Amino acid sequence: MIQKQFGLARYTFKPGWLGTLILLLCVPIFIKLGLWQYHKAVLKQQIQMQQQSTKEVLTSLPSMSADFSALQYKNVRIKGKYITEKQILLDNQVEASQAGFHVVTPLKIDGTNNLVLVNRGWIAGSKNRNDIPTFETPSNNVEVVGQLWIPSKKIFTLESGDQKNASSKIWQHLDMARYQKSLPNLLPVIIKLDEKSTAGGFVRHWQMPESKIASHFGYAYQWFGFAVASIFIYMFVSFKKRNY
């Protein structure tokens, strides 16, 4: 126990070493996590404001060597042809409380050798998870209108090696590096097909950046709250009633 004591009315402040150590470890961690979430929210808010300030619609995409991070959330309108033999289904996608898949199809961009993935939306799955649902894909050239998103590189999966082979049509995560092994000219970006597009789309209720921004702010305030709560708890248990 800390030997130094000071009185406050009928109580004395007698913090323990263990409680002090836990406080000194936890509070900086909580604050750091709160700041991390807060900065993520601010960054996405800035990207969103930049997007809303311009009506620019990209009609072409840069080469493989370009910095695609600057294209996050930008609108795009390009023409091409779907490569159906390389399309996949992303599993564990929920719409209106029903499990299903997102249909992801590579698009061969007109006038180039490059391809880009197009998320065409959600389709329902069957009760038997081993059954692959059937759906139609336009065989002619299409005009794809949508929004560019950068797939996350942070992937945690329980898929076995067999499930991750090149011929598998159902994936648990959108692994861009895995996709590019079979399609070397695949750009590291995906187009989420606009809800009004007629380029072979399905159910498309995309989560907009606003909701993610609010979530990050919520997590930030939660972590800051943990830090404040830790201090109050520490103070509460450290004040002991005097023995007269």
Image: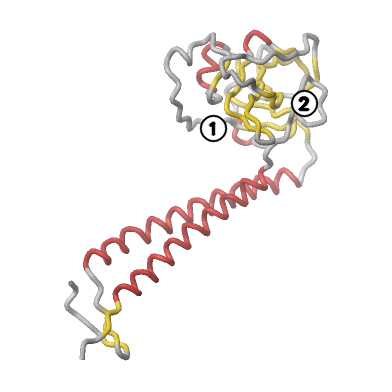
Q: Is residue 136 above or below residue 157?
A: above
Picture quarter with the N terminus:
bottom left
**Foreground: 61 or 196?**
196
**Foreground: 189 or 168?**
168
Question: 10 Å neighbourhood of mark 1: few (<14), some, or many (≥20)?
Answer: few
Picture quarter with the C terminus:
bottom left
Secondary structure under the numbered disc 1 in the rendered image: loop
Q: Position of residue 102 (x, y in %)?
A: 65, 25
Q: Which picture quadrant has residue 192?
A: top right
Residue at the spot of label 2: 59
Q: Is residue 72 above or below residue 139?
A: below
Q: Which picture quadrant has residue 228?
A: bottom left
Q: Residue at x 45, y 27 (%)?
A: 157
Q: Is residue 81 above or below residue 23?
A: above
Q: Residue at x 29, y 74 (%)?
A: 238
Residue at the spot of label 1: 152
Secondary structure under the numbered disc 2 in the rendered image: loop
* 1 and 2 marks in contact (CB < 8 Å): no
| Amino acid of disc 1 | Ser
Q: CA distance from mark 1 to mark 2?
A: 24 Å
Q: Residue at x 77, y 9 (%)?
A: 139
Q: Position of residue 28 (x, y in %)?
A: 37, 59
